[in-house]
Image (cartoon, rainbow, N blue to C red):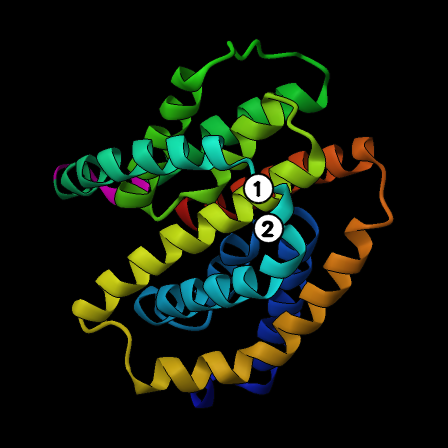
Amino acid sequence: MINELTMGGLLVSAAALFVGGFARGLTGFGNAAIIVTSLTFFLPPQQVVPLAIALEVIAGLMLLPSTTGAIHTSTLRTLLLGAALATPFGVLTLELVDADILRGGILLGILAVSVMLIYGITLPVPPGAGPTFAAGTVSGFGNGAAGLSGLPVALFLSARRDEIASLRATVSIYIVLIGMLTLAFLTLRGLVRADTLWATGAALPPMLAGLLLGRRSFNRISPATFRNAVLLLLCLASVLGLLPLL
């Protein structure tokens, strides 16, 4: 996999891995979106997606000691329940509807709501488990239909104005758990091979460098700056995901 890249491809990939790691360390999400979008210019998605998910799981486990105490456990349970129930419907829809249409629709929705929040247009989120469960179902559907799971959850928690440490920790562990499940499925489908493991090892240094810098930066920013960074990252991830569909 790595030996298929030119020197330019290697440099761009290393930069994408660093930026993705930084985003993950700072906000708790965004790593896979940046890696997949960047590396699929050079490698087939069947190779890039397992690599990105493996790196997401590793990044989340690396962040676990610094996020465990801030995880909103009841929110996490409700999100996972909704995701578990909706993922099979996303997979079924994927078999009936073009994947690019599904991915484009979800990304456009995330982009539109993120821009609204940036410009101060508030979205009332009713209290209780219902909206959280709904966010989990959207995430699970997006995961099964288009490989999108973390972005809808990050958007929901941002709109709900969760405390920044809780948002970061809850999204981070949610992505780890969903990633483990997806990685197991990909392994059963034969998409995780020896070259995936070698590529993961080679990709770790730049990603971990970004992750450590992002984790340090999180401790130095204000809640308002963090929220803006989350929304801008959601916009960036959405735009990057839409570019290949144009």
Which mark, by number, is residue 139?
none
Q: Does residue 216 show up?
A: yes
Q: Does residue 1 show up?
A: no
Q: Residue at x 31, y 63 (%)?
A: 183
> Which SS type dominates the magenta stretch?
helix
Q: Residue at x 36, y 38 (%)?
A: 80
Image spot of residue 23 (x, y percent): 66, 54
Specify the quadrant that holds the C terminus.
top left
Q: Please, is residue 181 above or below residue 10 in the view?
A: above
Task: Mark 2 and mark 1 in contact? Answer it, CB < 8 Å.
Answer: yes
Q: Amino acid at mark 2?
A: Thr
Tag count in the figure?
A: 2
- Could you tell me which secondary element the residue under label 2 belongs to? helix
Q: Amino acid at mark 1?
A: Ile
Q: Left or right: where does residue 125 sit relative to residue 226?
A: left
Of 82 and 205, nearer the camera is 82
Report the residue marked by disc 2. 68
Image spot of residue 238 (x, y percent): 52, 40
Reply yes or no: does residue 26 show up in magenta: no
Q: Categorize mark 1 by other alpha carbons within 10 Å: few (<14), some (14-19), many (20+).
A: many
User: Where are the magenta residues, as a range?
Assistant: 96-101
- Could you tell me which secondary element the residue under label 1 belongs to? loop
Q: Residue at x 64, y 27 (%)?
A: 162
Image spot of residue 124 (x, y percent): 57, 9
Q: What whole-number distance in Å separates the C-alpha atoms at marks 2 and 1?
A: 6 Å
Report the residue marked by disc 1. 71
